Amino acid sequence: MAIRLGDKAPDFTQNSTEGEIAFHDWIGDSWAVLFSHPADFTPVCTTELGQVAHLKPEFDKRNVKVIGLSVDSIESHKGWASDIEETQGAALNFPLLADEDRKVSELYDMIHPNAEATATVRSVFIIDPNKTVRLMLTYPAATGRDFGELLRVIDSLQLTEYEKVATPANWKSGEDVVILPAISNEEADKLFPKGYKELKPYLRITPQPNK
Ligand code: BEZ
């Protein structure tokens, strides 16, 4: 069955470059990003994994664990890792699942046969500490992802989890946010002591509360 936002992330056990991973146990009390790439020793994937390695401290700051996946073997992943370090200037610092039996790819519907029969597309799942799926993205093989966008989304997910706000288009952490429409002006007066601008009854803008 298709995975949808709000669903429990399917659990699995699979081999990785850092040994066998029992997914839910591995996530523990963190958030997680599970992402697939089509194949080892390919140009776009090489740049993507280098980017994730460079951004690892940013994921760590947000209490997010990152894990990659393709249907290649452990030996292939390990052989490719030195190319990533050499060409991207960052060593692999997160696990890569070796999903040769497609167990995880099938569980998460990462193979889209009408796009590519034998390889995973570029899927992303952001999963919260309750193991709930909070975001899904799917990109085609020829288009590398913007992993800075994942950090931006994580900032929004983690903010809106605790504050009665939502984040507008192109929002970045530190910028103004919008008050949830379900919050009355009387409640908003109490919840947002920095004040808010009411452009419309449903569009009220306030400084980011936790900054
Ligand atoms: C790449 O990672 O460069 C790639 C992989 C599969 C198809 C096209 C590009």
Image (cartoon, grey):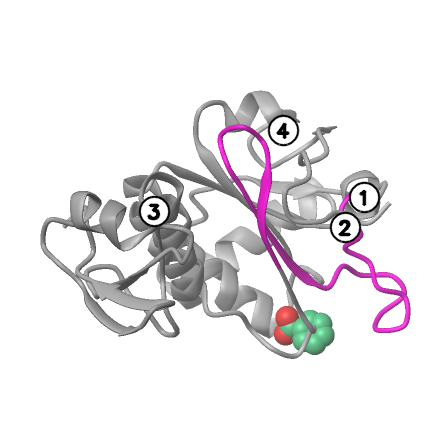
Q: Nearer the viewer, mark 3 or mark 4?
A: 3
SS class, disc 4: helix
Question: Mark 1 belongs to which amino acid?
Answer: Glu
Left or right position of 34 against 90: right
Residue 182, position in %: x, y?
42, 52
Q: Is residue 191 above or below residue 136?
A: above
CB of mark 1 within 8 Å of CB of mark 3? no
CB of mark 1 within 8 Å of CB of mark 2? yes
Instruction: Report the predominant secondary structure element of the magenta stretch.
Output: loop
Question: Mark 4 belongs to which amino acid?
Answer: Phe
Q: Is residue 209 above or below residue 40?
A: above
The residue wearing badge 2 is: 71
Of the numbered discs 4 and 1, the one sitting upstream in the chain is 4
Q: Nearer the viewer, mark 1 or mark 3?
A: 3
Q: Nearer the viewer, mark 3 or mark 2?
A: 3
Residue at x 58% of width, y 31% of height: 131
Residue at x 37% of width, y 69% of height: 168
Marks 3 and 2 sit apart, C-alpha to C-alpha, by 41 Å
SS class, disc 3: loop
Question: Mark 2 belongs to which amino acid?
Answer: Val
The residue wearing badge 1 is: 100
Circle 3 Cα neighbour tier, 10 Å, few/some/many (<14 / 14–19 / ≥20) = some
Q: Nearer the viewer, mark 2 or mark 4?
A: 4
Q: Nearer the viewer, residue 85 or 46?
A: 46
The residue wearing badge 3 is: 164
Residue pushed farthest front?
186
